[in-house]
């Protein structure tokens, strides 16, 4: 009953097979091999347009280097107050951008609120050097709160970003889960809605280590090869990452895996909603859910082998957690077993 | 006939098997799983003492984050003038240390010359803030020039470093090749000779992506978990790296692979020494060699399928390259085939 | 009628005289001259204990380098949401610390709220690298909102900071104004209340360019000489700054000047409170005040020659500004003329 | 007999008068006052074209921020091996550029050798990310070694820089001394010879604190206002710096002062050349000179009150210093007294 994080899962057999197959012989290093080129082509197909794609090793690297690519001196990134880039990357975005500020914007359910975004941007007057200068807006899809943006919500945020001459970045650590939950196409959810750069995560959903930065405007990527190398994220044997992506994107494996993950979360959500010892903290749709448990219940579940994390409540005070309660995050993955879910649901009733 | 670089090789079957085996089920992320702990223990055994070991994704990351761990404001790293950290990491060491200077020290055959090192250090007067302050000495073993330091040479450099209160770092991207060529033990070549921090590379020698920073004084690593995470080098599914290391270090596989690689280079060296169209640029002992080819010969070899890089000659002018000549670097690997070597040697006669 | 900022004032005659006197002859550069030493001694007297004092050129430098001195990898500074270090330094604090995060904490009237501070700190679990690690708390005295902390309020915040092993920094760009308004002693307002590092500003209050970083624990300053030089803030002719400080601190000139400045603000406050076209946005006590003007009134005042800035309202929504209104900041200085104040007060009735 | 450095001098009376005059009344801060504008216009006249000029507080800031303005990821600055930016700025250039490398180029007499420069640049192959990418060439005029570049030498270096799409920066900490020694015009020595950015120093030659970055192509300065503010070098009361520049540039005061300084150095040079206890280490022409003294002579001079620094010999070994000898640097300034020079010359015979 491991619901700690989707990165507690391993790698899908298809990914391992692809790796074993790629292991033989010699191939050009640093992204120049045939399989690297094939993956680049595959990304063009997935996104229905030419993209510039760069592999990196971690989601933190993807986000941080994406910001570095579009940064300006005194740059500011507008992001949700509980965004991963603020709360969970140990300052890497600030570090890789040499100090760009991650400016928190409030919004219900982990989603950037367009009106708040607009109000925050209004605080920056053009040419007023003291305040610095916004350079990007970032949103996560699925969000850190397990919620999703509808396509038109992304469009609304993109419109604001572009009005202010800012790049729109999407943190897609759980991009596949968002696609699987909405039946949107990759193109619809990104560049057609106005996204300029995507952190495309595959690690959590069946790969070992496969993350990519996808630029929908290749011009924005012009200095990225140097940015990536300087950032120690240019891997020598890139075919090991390319092979994972090939297997991952083959025949919609990625969407199937995400679909399973989401379905497992649906069952957990239903079980918690039906429980008298727990309640869902807010509605979610992807493979993450947040629940308020009685402390005693949480302890009992953990004694029975359930693994899940304590979580910080939102800053906006929208989720009251009582004295004898705790807020828990539960995450399912491509390898979550239905039996574990059923058992957990039983235990919680 | 690929002699471009040892990172053109793939992964050893044992490494792939270990990965496949690790792929199943759930395991704690971010270094907390059983296999992570087992690898840490294995490193203690390999080095015959307790060490603090941290996985990272690239050799550039290992070197850069190691420097970050011991840096001081205005810090200076003394290194060979043609060191990888100067010439081939796109400024990553300077970037991750926020601007530490890589100060070039001359020395024959890619080896730091102790007397030159001492003279350069003398230029820094204690407390004279304008010059900055040295904070580390780094040497590569095997060196970028394919040569090796004898244990007592390392000791001599360590003595100078420690006299000046500097950490001694070893860039061990080809550490196994150095061990295999000298029959030294890992302990003898490192902490017993005075090395404080080692970049332990396994990627070039049979793994996909397996690098580690090894601190012989765990106290120096106190802030390293934050340094690594901020540097976007904390991988979530660390067991994928741990599994590689387990296979790599099992039953001396790593030394066998390096031994093969060195032996292949020996044959190439012998063949070039015997050729009338080429000459060895300087003596080497590991899996790298440098040769001056007639331009016509180089072109002919390449037409026949040989792959090797043009190389910049040393700054010290010790390797004259004529008008109709070129300097080439050739590197062998664990997967270099004897047939390829023989064929190359024939072609060059 | 210039109420734009106290840095629109020039330099006090005593400061100019001191400069002219120091101009002759030769003196050791970089802080080693007799007058430099005399100022250091003067600071000891002012603060009634031994301090380590370092001159820098701007308040932004003082704050940023102070943070750099106590930073840790992944470091986080807790500060008020509308602090100068967030809103008005163009990312310099993040830049000089290589990406420390300025974490916004809410609080009424520009003052850090201890309860909110404690709640924000609770979000950081020890050793949880993802969140980074708090390294300092900073407060401004007087605040950016023109308010003041009482001594026991500083003590309360210091207690929280020290419980969490964090340095407490005070941004004293208007330190003299705070002292003059409260009759506290420099010692009472700083180290006796738990402040570890003070940005001591003199520029706004009668000097040309005189800022200092004062460490109450000299041990924390150990690497500061290198941090300052690397930060391009080590001036060669430090006696030009020392001379300003000598004149500034002589015979309580600094407190007299601040007293005048505060008194001028008091008259403005009284005038605005009595006006039917304007209202004070919140109570202030130092030389800054904030008023909501009818837009028409603001335009009329500006036509008559009044200079003041439009200001962003607090994030917390506590200051409603109507459609036909604007929020203005007014600042007085040591050289503000009573006539200008009287004239402004007349105009606003 | 102070020959330690020209920054041991104070400020010229005309500079003090200008400051006193500027001290009264209110003026727009942060570079927006009338006197700021007047100085900008004065710079246009001095350089016979429109320039973009930005005041900063130190020469280190001028150089470092200039590099930051033209940096690229993985950027490399080509500079003389003994350049101030390498040897005397505590890593500030690396710091402000987030790790650009200062790549040392050898050359006799402290001057970049064009052939060596070309050879070093050749080591960088276009698009080869590992090596990083050159972004600027910098030379000092007068050099750190007290020598000068002839105009055509600057042109030769500019041609190489521009061939490689690199900005040419001139460190003009002693720019006036170079002009005074050669009777070149400011335009001839800079943009007409191909210089793109100049660090214009006035501090050493009669001001308190007056440095400027001058962009001959204002487009290169587009982001500089943010770069300067983020770098904590935007002073609030810029008129204090503007006033210094006004006095300094009025009626060629700056060139007269530099002329005196150079003349004093000429007398010292003649005296040392005639001495049997000392010899000039190499020929110099500005206000710096380098001499090899018998150790006993140096001690005697110091006992008599002479102040001068020990100096590190050039890396190229061109200046042998015997066992009983030391290498000294002597610097004269606008306020060096003829009597001191005569007395020193007597003592050394």
Image (cartoon, coloured by chain):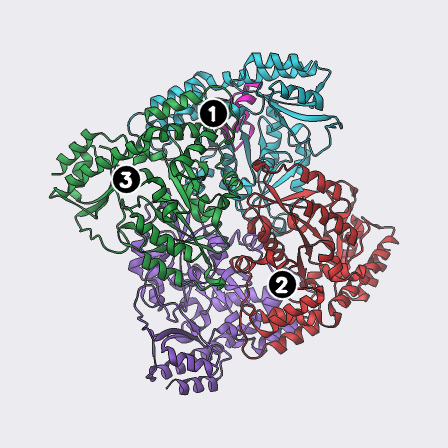
Chain colours: A cyan, B green, C red, D purple
Q: Chain of mark 2?
A: C
Name the image quarter holding residue D77: bottom left
Magenta span: A175-202
Q: Give x and y (percent) for residue C189.
A: 75, 57
Q: Which mark is residue C53?
A: 2
Q: In the rendered structure, are the residues bearing label 2 and label 3 in contact, judged by CB atoms less than 8 Å apart? A: no
Numbered disc in front, either 3 or 1? 3
Residue drawn at the location 70% of the way across and 51% of the way down: C139
Residue designated by label 1? A47
Q: Residues within 10 Å of mark 1 (few under 14, many from 20)?
A: some
* Residue ID for mark 3: B183
Q: Secondary structure at mark 3?
A: loop
| Above or below D93: residue C12 | below
Which percent across, then down, holds residue C98? 54, 48
Tell me whether circle 2 and circle 1 mark residues in contact (CB < 8 Å): no
Q: Position of residue A165 (x, y in %)?
A: 57, 40
């Amino acid at each position: 009953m491991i619901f700690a994080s989707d990165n507690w899962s391993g790698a899908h057999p298809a990914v391992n097979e692809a790796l074993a197959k790629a292991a033989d012989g010699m191939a050009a290093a640093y992204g120049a091999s045939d399989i690297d080129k094939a993956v680049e082509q595959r990304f063009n197909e997935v996104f229905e347009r030419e993209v510039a794609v760069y592999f990196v090793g971690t989601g933190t690297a993807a986000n941080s280097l994406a910001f570095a690519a579009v940064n300006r001196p005194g740059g500011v990134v507008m992001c949700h107050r509980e965004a991963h880039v603020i709360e969970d990357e140990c300052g890497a975005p600030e570090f890789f951008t040499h100090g760009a500020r991650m400016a928190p914007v409030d919004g219900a359910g982990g989603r950037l609120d367009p009106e708040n975004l607009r109000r925050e941007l209004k605080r920056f007057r053009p040419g007023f050097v003291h305040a610095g200068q916004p350079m990007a807006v970032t949103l996560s899809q699925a969000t850190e709160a397990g919620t999703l943006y509808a396509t038109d919500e992304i469009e609304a945020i993109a419109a604001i970003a572009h009005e202010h001459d800012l790049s729109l970045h999407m943190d897609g650590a759980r991009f596949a889960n968002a696609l699987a939950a909405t039946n949107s196409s990759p193109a619809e959810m990104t560049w057609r809605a106005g996204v300029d750069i995507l952190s495309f995560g595959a690690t959590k959903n069946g790969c070992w280590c496969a993350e990519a930065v996808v630029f929908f405007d290749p011009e924005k990527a012009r200095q990225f090869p140097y940015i990536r190398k300087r950032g120690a994220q240019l891997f020598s044997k890139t075919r090991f990452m390319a092979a994972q992506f090939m297997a991952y994107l083959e025949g919609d494996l990625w969407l199937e895996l995400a679909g399973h993950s989401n379905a497992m979360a649906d069952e957990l959500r239903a079980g918690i909603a039906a429980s008298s010892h727990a309640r869902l903290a807010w509605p979610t749709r992807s493979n993450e859910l947040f629940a308020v448990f009685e402390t005693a219940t949480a302890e009992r579940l953990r004694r029975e082998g359930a693994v899940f994390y304590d979580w910080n409540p939102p800053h906006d005070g929208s989720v009251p957690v009582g004295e004898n309660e705790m807020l828990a995050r539960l995450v399912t993955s491509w390898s979550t077993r239905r039996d574990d879910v059923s058992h957990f649901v039983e235990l919680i009733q």
